[in-house]
Amino acid sequence: MFVSSDINFDSYYIPNWWYAGLIKSSGLRKPAYHNLKLLIEKTDGFESVQNIRDHLYEFTFSDQKSVYLYWNESNLPADLSDLHSNSFTIHPFVYKVNDTPISFVVTDLTSHTFGANPTLIELNE
């Protein structure tokens, strides 16, 4: 993965290359930078990862609660019935330049619409 490049991939003829790298040559941090930083912050030190079901993964730790990674590629409502808590902290990954991850708390996972963009979920007390 490129960390930075002087090539203007925004206008490159292969669209997938528009998102290559972590930082633009101008110094602007790309979505991949923010998503990788968030993933490292929330899963650093995990002991194992288990696939609970399609698109739902559990990162387990010895000294803290599990963190879950979920994305929904269908138009069906998310089935997160395996996750039980009084509230959940949601950390959606970003996919647009100039966006930074914004975390928020919900009391009911059915109140949040999950899309194909991955989301980290933490169970609160």
Image (cartoon, grey):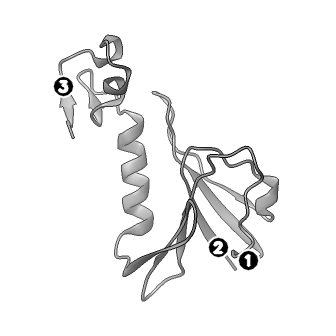
Tell me where residue 88 appears, x and y as whole percent: 69, 66
Location of residue 116 (image quadrant): top right
Quarter of the picture containing the N terminus is: top left
The residue that appears at 36% across and 60% down in the rendered structure is 40
Location of residue 68 (image quadrant): bottom right
The residue that appears at 37% across and 50% down in the rendered structure is 36
Would residue 13 be found to the left or right of residue 70 on screen? left
Where does label 1 land, which residue? 85
Quarter of the picture containing the C terminus is: bottom right
Q: Which amino acid does label 2 sit on?
A: Leu
Whether 9 is drawn above or below 2: the answer is: above
* Secondary structure under the numbered disc 3 in the rendered image: strand
Q: How crowded is mark 1: few (under 14 residues within 10 Å), some or many (20 or more)?
A: few
Label 2–label 1 contact, CB within 8 A = yes
Q: What residue type is labelled 3?
A: Ser
Q: How crowded is mark 3: few (under 14 residues within 10 Å), some or many (20 or more)?
A: some
The residue that appears at 27% across and 27% down in the rendered structure is 27
Whether 84 is drawn above or below 111: the answer is: below
Label 2–label 3 contact, CB within 8 A = no
Q: Which amino acid does label 1 sit on?
A: Ser
How far apart are the alpha carbons under marks 2 and 3?
Answer: 38 Å
Where does label 3 land, which residue? 5
Tell me where residue 97 appears, x and y as whole percent: 45, 27
The residue that appears at 37% across and 52% down in the rendered structure is 37
Q: Residues within 10 Å of mark 2 (few under 14, many from 20)?
A: some
